[in-house]
Every structure is written in C-alpha cells, then in structure tokens.
Amino acid sequence: MLGLCTVSPDRGAAEGRHIEMSQQAKEVEETVEGLLLRLEEFCSLADMIRSDTSQILEENIPLLKAKVMEIRGIYAKVDQLEAFVKMVGHHVSFLEAHVLQAERDHGALSQALRKWLGSSGLPAFGNKLWTPAAPTFELPALYRTEDYFPVDAGEATRRAPSCQRL
C-alpha cells in the first residue's frame, strides 16, 4: 500500500515543473496579449493622427492661406489709408498757411483801417489811397479722393442711394 501512495520523485518533480511552466506560459501569453492590445491601440491612434494631419494639410492649410492673403490685402489698404491721411494732413497744413497769408494780405485789419480812415472825413485817406494792388491768389493744386480710392461701378450703385438722401 505504501507503494501505491508514493509517487516517484522524478515523476512528481516533472509534473510540478510542468504545472509551474504552464502557469508561466499563461502569464507570458497574457502579457503578450496585453502588449498586442496596446500595440493595436497605438496603431489606431497613429492612424487617427495621420488622418487628422492629412485633413489639416488638405482642408485647413488652404483656408489659412486664403485668410493670410485677405489679411495682407487689408494691411495694404490700411497702409494706403495711413499714407492718404498723412498727405491730407500735409495739404491741410499747406492750406491753413495759405489762408493765414491771404488773411494777412486781404484781411480784416486792412478793411477795418480803411473804414476807420474813411470815416474820419479826410479826403486824402479815401479808399483809393489804401487799396493796394491785390496780389492774385492761385488755388493750390489739390488731391482728388477718387485718385486714391477708385470707386468700382458696383460700389457706386450701392452708394448712390445713400448719397442722394444727404
């Protein structure tokens, strides 16, 4: 009876190693399956990134380029407006200087002096004595707004009703 219950040491060790190896094999298999699952998730993430990148390159980049060109046009118009405002400022200063000179040449002071001397009753100080030869005044060459901001035919028809109301 003892012989039936006893297991030979070689056979028990082999079975123990077999059980131990099958557990290790299961652990390795589970680890490999986990790694394969993670690899699959990584591949799907990489595919999603590729599709997003191609969408950006195919759709969004041309839209951005169009917006950049539109903004460049707006910047050019702003630069033109700045130059125009600067030029108008120079013209205003120039015209103010001409107005001041004209006031000095033809101004209220000489008219008031003529009236005062004329009202004194002295015939020698009549209007003929105090009428200096009036220098001719030439209007300076001015700008035309249309030269700097041409009006398209379509814009002119859209603006025409609002101009008529004024």
Image (tube, helix red, strand yellow):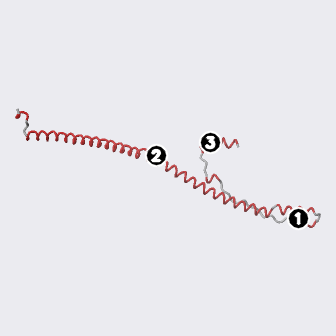
In terms of secondary structure, where does tag 2 sit? helix
Q: Position of residue 160 (x, y in %)?
A: 65, 43
Q: Position of residue 153 (x, y in %)?
A: 60, 45
Residue placed at 17% from the left, 41% from the top? 20
- In space, the residues marked 3 and 2 are separated at their CA atoms by 29 Å
Residue nearest the viewer, comparing 142 with 69: 69
In terms of secondary structure, where does tag 3 sit? helix
* Residue that mark 3 sits on: 158
Mark 3 or 1, which is nearer the eye?
3
* Residue that mark 1 sits on: 128
Give left or right: position of 57 versus 2.
right
* Residue that mark 2 sits on: 63
Q: Position of residue 58 (x, y in %)?
A: 40, 45
Residue placed at 44% from the left, 45% from the top? 60
Mark 2 or 1, which is nearer the eye?
2
Residue furthest out toward the front: 2
For badge 1, the amino acid type reads Lys
Give left or right: position of 3 versus 128.
left
User: In the figure, 17 relative to 126: above or below?
Assistant: above
For badge 3, the amino acid type reads Arg
Give left or right: position of 126 versus 163.
right
In terms of secondary structure, where does tag 1 sit? loop
Position of the C terminus by quadrant: top right
Q: Quadrant of residue 87?
A: bottom right
